[in-house]
Image (cartoon, rainbow, N blue to C red):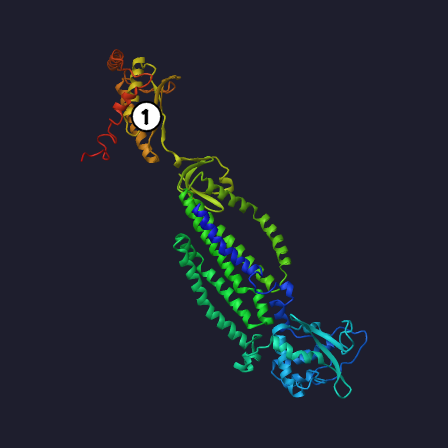
Amino acid sequence: MRKHTTTIHLLVPILVAWFSVASPIWGWGPALAETGEPTLRELIQKRGKKSQPAEQAAPRSVQVEVPEDSLGRGTPRSSIQGFLTATKRRQYQQAAEYLDLRNMPGEMTGESGPDLARQLKIVFDRVLIIDLDLLSAEPQGDQEDNLPPGRDRIGRIPTEGKAYDILLQRVDRGDGTLIWKFAGPTVADIPELYEQFGYGRLEQVFPAWFFDVSVLGIHVWLWVAVIGISILMYPVASLIMWLAVQGMRPFHPDLAEQIKRFFTGPLTVLIWTVLVRNIGELLGPSVILHALRQARTVQLIALAWLLMRFVDFAVHRAASNLGQKGLTGAAILLKPAARLIKLVALAGAVLVWLDNIGYEVTTLLAGLSISGIAVALASQKSLENIFGAITLFTSQPVRVGDFCRFGDQVGTVEEIGLRATKIRTLDRTVITVPNAEFANMHLDNFSERDRFWYHPLLGLRQETTPDQIRYLLVEIRKMLYAHPKVLSEPLHVRFRGFGEYSLDLEVFAYIGVTDYTESLEIAEDLNLRVMDIVSAAGTEFAVPAQVQYSLEGKPFDEKRAQGVGGEVKEWKTKQALYLPNFPKEKIAEVKGSLDYPPTGSPQAAVPV
């Protein structure tokens, strides 16, 4: 139960991290689709490309010559482009020429033009991105925008109480030539817009260039602010993580140690991103900053890192559990499975990031699915072998190091891989069998033996007397019961019947060892003892009748046969002929009374 609780506790920070990236519930602003703000990809494209000049625009039904103007104010597109170029170069006096300053309130004179141009540029940088290609390249402007002739809208800035239309007006330059400038109502709204979206008191502290100069499309002040906040917040995030682990130790010491080992790094980064994003909101609106926040690049990196560490943690726990159950071989499968899960997690993070910055991933996913089907069909045999490996590792009919029979071959298992199993045969060659085939074979695992079967069939000469057979049945049983390496149950020695050329005795017993070599040693000892007993009984093993001897066989020993017969008669008199079974007390009496290894062997026990 505690293991499941630990796993649930560890899942909580991962779920929280996922929601922090995949949903807007943290108060980081509405979703992208709701705001209509440009994505990072769109912002880069709009910032990086230049609009087509008016001469390269699509053919017009009515050709109207673009008026010549040194500032390029002949069309709405070229006028806005000229204004943005002048403000980017900080040429605000020139930028003021794009503002219609006629009929302005008394405080807004022509001398305030450069300041108004600068303020309007700052408003654009913070809340409005202009796509030049959407603006008209016609001298008359867009005649299908439901606006009065000579007026075009280039954007709209919504606020809580009012929506500001950014308008261009076609006005007389003073010499009868019509050019495009920012309309008077828009110019009149600049102070209000700047009051809401400007830098306020920051401009009283830092010089003006601090807010005008850009590096890689981002203003210097924004670089300084984001870098400063990031540097300050990382120690705070580390402290929060450390306090969380320390606070958990008194209640869940194992869980605290596991979080510290596997999750400290990614969770610290996630906490850091939460702090930076929320404090970054205090910097005010910014188109670029908003696009960067929507990308959630660092968060996705941290989340992918967290998922990978969780996979490592799960593999660690699974390997421990398999080891406790004796399935250590199955742990080999965990490594490739972990790599696959990590690869999927990394690919998912990349796809989410691409979607966040504005790429359409639907087409990409469709292509990947088709490619996946093709790969699956091409790798069908490989997948069968992988599933065969899973079967071998989980059911474990054989393990590495086991001696087994597979088909008509025998050998020792040296390696169970993902594709094939390698087995070294008795010829010392290595056979490689695909796992899909090997798992479906009849496998006889000799290494799983808990004992070895001793089962010789003794063929005696047909001249053997019944009493000699009775003697052999008793003495061989006595020897087996007495042997310390032979199990008492099950055990029997029976007169099986009459063979074609012999009288057959069947011996059935188990040698109580698991090592194959040791079993051969014991079987050898038992065979020699059986031969001694047969010799002592005065009989011999039968020779096939079809074998021709050039010499006479050993003469029949009637004296020993009579002696064995007398001993069997004595057993009958004393009721000591233990047939068909030995009594338990007699088994207990003779059990372990023989020396093994036998006397004379270097391995025989030496008295201390």
- Asked where in the image residue 478 lies, by quadrant, the reply is top left
Q: Compared with residue 257, is residue 36 higher up or lower down, i.e. above or below?
A: below
Q: Is residue 206 visible?
A: no
Q: Residue furthest right?
A: 62
Q: Quadrant of the C terminus?
A: top left
User: Is residue 489 visible to the viewer in this orientation of the structure?
Assistant: yes
- Residue drawn where x is 47% and y is 42% of the image: 394
Going 59% across and 63% down the picture, which residue do you hit?
356
Q: Is residue 300 above or below residue 61?
A: above
**In this view, 166 is above or below 555:** below
- Residue type indicated by callout 1: Ser
Per the image, label 1 sits on a secondary structure element best described as: loop
Question: Closer to the camera, 506 or 33?
Answer: 33
Q: Which residue is mark 1?
A: 488
- x and y percentages locating residue 203 in the rendered image: 55, 80
Q: Nearer the viewer, residue 245 or 583?
A: 245
- Residue 314, given in percent of the width and then of the height, sits at 46, 51
Residue 262 drawn above or below residue 442: below
Residue 131 falls left or right of residue 548: right
Query: Residue 410 at x, y = what percent?
Result: 42, 37
Single out the residue that lies furthest toward the left.
608
Quarter of the image with the N terminus is top left
Who is closer to the viewer here, 177 or 211? 211
Return the residue nearer the eye: 238 or 380: 238
How packed mark 1 is, by other alpha carbons closer than 10 Å (few <14, some 14-19, many 20 or more), is: many
Number of marks in the rendered image:
1
